[in-house]
Image (cartoon, rainbow, N blue to C red):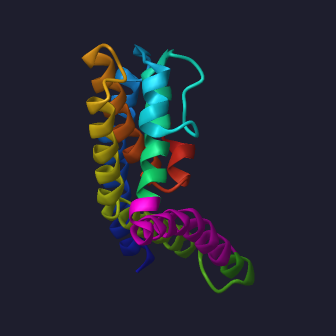
Amino acid sequence: MFRLLIILAVIPIVIAFVVRWWFGLRVISSIGRHQCRCDLEKWDRAFGSEHIPVSKSADAVIFADLLRKSALADWRTRDSKAAISREGARRFGMAVPPLAAMGAILGLIVGRIPFTGVLAIFLIALAFAAVIAYLGIAPELKAIITTSRRLRDNHIFPRSEDEEAVIRAANALVWKEAAPPVFNLIQR
């Protein structure tokens, strides 16, 4: 029975790894080092001084991270219930797999659960956390789209290719960060 559960859990985990790599890590590795220049005054007017870049020239991923943080802050003010719900899903993904592993290991120590059971419980918890994380990603991507419109309207980046690189990298960061933190240990 535990072997069947392991097989059923591995399928969504592998899909989550592929999705995270395709939409997140691959994009970040291809455009993340792209050097961009922005107008800091326009950035400050558009997004406020809380998430302002340190320098007007940096990698696209640095601007993308600040754009994502600004989008999330704006989303929290516009739709606090959805933002709180998304943060709850993120916390769920952080807490459930390690807690399930601890409980299963205690069961192994006591002698109630075999090793395959411990592995099955951990993998099912990880698969469930990954599915919950990726099913709830749409509102966060929508927040990035809304903030990206403001980025384009204010012409913060003089070159359109810099602007596109930052927006693509911000979307990729959403896909990368949505997965449970355990994925960061395995897939960088």
Q: Main secondary structure of the magenta part?
A: helix
Q: Is residue 89 magenta?
A: yes
Place of residue 29 in the rendered image (x, y in percent of width and height, measured from the top left): 40, 25
User: Residue at horizontal 46%, vertical 67%?
Assistant: 89
- Viewer-side residue, 37 vs 13: 37
Dividing the picture into quadrants, the one containing residue 170 is: top left
Locate residue 4 relative to residue 59 in the image: left or right.
left
Give the vertical position of 87 relative to 43 (above or below): below
- 1 inside magenta stretch: no
Asked if one can make out residue 24 in the rendered structure from this viewpoint, the answer is no
Q: Is 183 situated left or right of 106 in this image?
A: left
* Image quarter of the N terminus: bottom left
For this rendering, which residue is in front, 67 or 88?
67
Q: How many marks?
A: 0
Question: Between residues 181 and 166, which one lies in front from this camera angle?
Answer: 166
Q: Is residue 147 left or right of residue 100?
A: left
Specify the farthest residue to the bottom.
112
Which residue appears at 55% of the width and 27% of the height? 53
Magenta part of the protein: which range? 77-105
Q: Is residue 136 left or right of residue 57?
A: left
From the viewer's perspective, is residue 59 above or below residue 20? above
Residue occupying image coordinates x 27% and y 39%: 149
Residue 138 screen position, x and y as percent: 29, 58
- Kindly give the residue lying farthest to the right in the view shown: 109
Residue 170 in sight here: yes
131 vs 60: above or below: below
The location of residue 181, given as percent across then percent down, is 55, 53
Residue found 61% across the figure and 81% down from its top: 113
